[in-house]
Image (tube, helix red, strand yellow):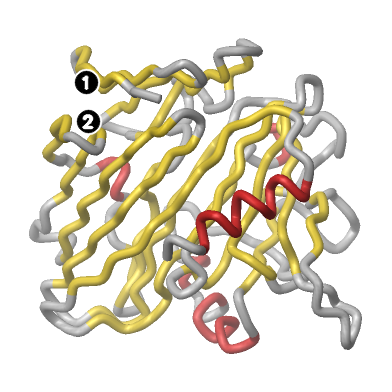
């Protein structure tokens, strides 16, 4: 299913039979905006006030927070795979980031490549995706019952323990990185709880009225935690109590000076996807890693 790309000023627009949208590539809050599921007309990604889907965001390393990638100048071009955006290192950000965005029908693949120009202790790249209002968040989590190993897909609903943000680490070892103080750093500190470990790096938001679903997934070797604002109220989430977001936190480890690392994310857009279908999409992605 062919996807066409073309530039319109600061935007790079895309369209195929299933989805259409545009990517803001310069200025503040760069990201994939106005993503529409064409059969239903439902807008998935937020419009002008938030970056939308798959915006490279927070970067941590060496006990500091670097500039938000989504606000940095970059180079962009349409390539055979889709859209390539390069953020070269500068005096404040000692790393290069290259991202390639490729749509095939309702499936978006993103490939990231990062090169560190200095040693980066505890390096982390956060990818933020903000959806429009009315999408309920779900996570693929491990059971908290001893001996139960099958993954569970559950809604991330508000309760007295979750407050606004819930973070799901990959393993106990990753708590050391998550709680090293990085998410307390300005300008946007975050308070959160960790109710469970993720089973697969897989989360989604489903539109409560139409069933349109946007499923995000990451490479389990490179994704060390996932964060979601909780659903409040559960059936039609209120964005005033937390952005309609899914945040994938990648790497969470030391990089040597001159080291290049790469990883992938995938987003799948569909309607009335069952949990079995969501897991099948994950398994299809995992086989390509």
Q: Which residue carries the number 2 mark? A: 26
Residue sitting at x 17%, y 64%: 95
Q: Is residue 180 above or below residue 233?
A: below
Q: Looking at the image, is mark 1 or mark 2 earlier in the sequence?
A: 1
Locate residue 42, reporting x and y percent. 63, 16
Query: How busy is the neighbourhood of tag 2: few (under 14 within 10 Å), some, or many (20 plus)?
Result: some
Residue sitting at x 78%, y 41%: 274
Q: Which residue carries the number 1 mark? A: 10
Quadrant (top left/top right/bottom left/bottom right) for the C terminus? bottom left
Answer left or right for 260 relative to 60.
left
Most foreground residue, 49 or 112: 112
Query: How busy is the neighbourhood of tag 1: few (under 14 within 10 Å), some, or many (20 plus)?
Result: few
Locate residue 216, reporting x and y percent. 56, 48
> Which secondary structure lies at badge 2?
loop
> Which secondary structure lies at badge 1?
loop
Locate residue 66, reporting x and y percent. 29, 61
Residue sitting at x 43%, y 39%: 108
């Amino acid at each position: 299913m062919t996807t066409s790309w073309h530039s319109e000023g600061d935007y790079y627009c895309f369209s195929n039979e299933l989805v259409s949208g545009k990517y803001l590539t310069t200025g503040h809050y760069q990201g994939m905006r106005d993503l529409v599921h064409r059969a239903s007309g439902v807008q998935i990604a937020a419009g002008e006030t938030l970056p939308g889907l798959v915006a490279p965001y927070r970067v941590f390393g060496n006990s500091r927070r670097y500039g938000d990638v989504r606000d940095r100048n970059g180079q962009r071009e349409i390539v055979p795979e889709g859209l390539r955006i390069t953020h070269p290192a500068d005096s404040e950000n000692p790393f290069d980031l290259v991202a390639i965005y490729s749509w095939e029908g309702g499936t978006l693949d993103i490939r990231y490549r990062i090169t560190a120009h200095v040693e980066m202790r505890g390096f982390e790249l956060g990818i933020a995706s903000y959806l429009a209002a009315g999408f309920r968040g779900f996570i693929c989590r491990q059971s908290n019952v001893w001996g139960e190993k099958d993954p569970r897909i559950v809604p991330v609903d508000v309760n007295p323990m979750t407050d606004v943000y819930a973070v799901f680490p990959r393993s106990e070892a990753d708590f050391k990185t998550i709680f090293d103080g990085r998410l307390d750093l300005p300008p946007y500190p975050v308070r959160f709880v960790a109710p469970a470990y993720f089973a697969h790096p897989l989360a989604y938001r489903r539109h409560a009225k139409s069933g349109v679903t946007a499923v995000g997934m990451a490479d389990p070797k490179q994704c060390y935690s996932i964060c979601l604002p909780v659903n409040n109220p559960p059936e039609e989430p209120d964005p005033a109590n937390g952005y309609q977001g899914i945040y994938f936190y990648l790497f969470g480890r030391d990089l040597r000076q001159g080291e290049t690392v790469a990883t992938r994310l995938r987003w799948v857009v569909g309607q009335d996807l069952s949990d079995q279908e969501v897991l099948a999409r994950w398994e299809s992605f995992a086989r390509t890693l």
